Amino acid sequence: MPKRPPKEVDIAIGSTALANFVIILIIGIVVGLAFNRYARGWLARLGATRSSDITSALVGIAGAFIGFHLGVILGLLPSPAMLYLAAVAGAILVLWLWRGR
């Protein structure tokens, strides 16, 4: 009978994936809210509502996932920090394109 690796290996892979998921969510939310609050003119900021914050956060999350996975496809694997920077860049790019700039 072949030996099966210990359960700790499976748990470590799952916890790493969960940690990446949570970090990407946080990156998307923070970038989305910051973009909604600070990347517009002063007059548009006066009309910022809770629904615009939620929408910007959701679009930021989508951009962070796109950036993260493009980083994986491009092979930025030596350091997770590179993938997180790709997630930030993806969130900024998607938000910028979504705003029509």
Image (cartoon, rainbow, N blue to C red):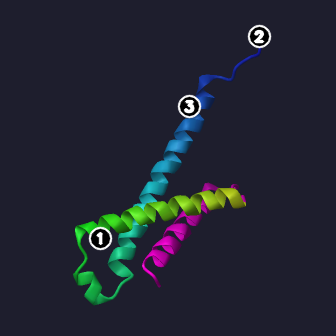
Q: Distance between the residues labelled 3 and 2?
A: 23 Å
- Which image quarter holds the N terminus? top right
Depth check, mark 2 against mark 1: the one in front is: 1
Asked if labels 1 and 2 touch by Cβ distance under 8 angstroms, the answer is no
Helix, strand or loop at label 3? It is helix
- Name the residue: 72% across, 58% down: 75
Q: Looking at the picture, how far across and down is residue 79, in whole percent?
A: 65, 56
| Kind of residue indicated by mark 1 | Ser
| Location of residue 73 by image quarter | bottom right
Left or right: residue 52 versus residue 16 is left
| Kind of residue indicated by mark 3 | Ile
Left or right: residue 22 versus residue 70 is left
Helix, strand or loop at label 1? It is helix
Q: Which of 36 and 19 is in front in this view?
A: 36
Please name the residue that numbered disc 2 is placed on.
1
Please name the residue that numbered disc 3 is placed on.
11
| Kind of residue indicated by mark 2 | Met
| Range of magenta residues | 75-101
Q: Which of marks 2 and 1 is nearer the N terminus?
A: 2
| Location of residue 16 by image quarter | top right
Please name the residue that numbered disc 1 is placed on.
52
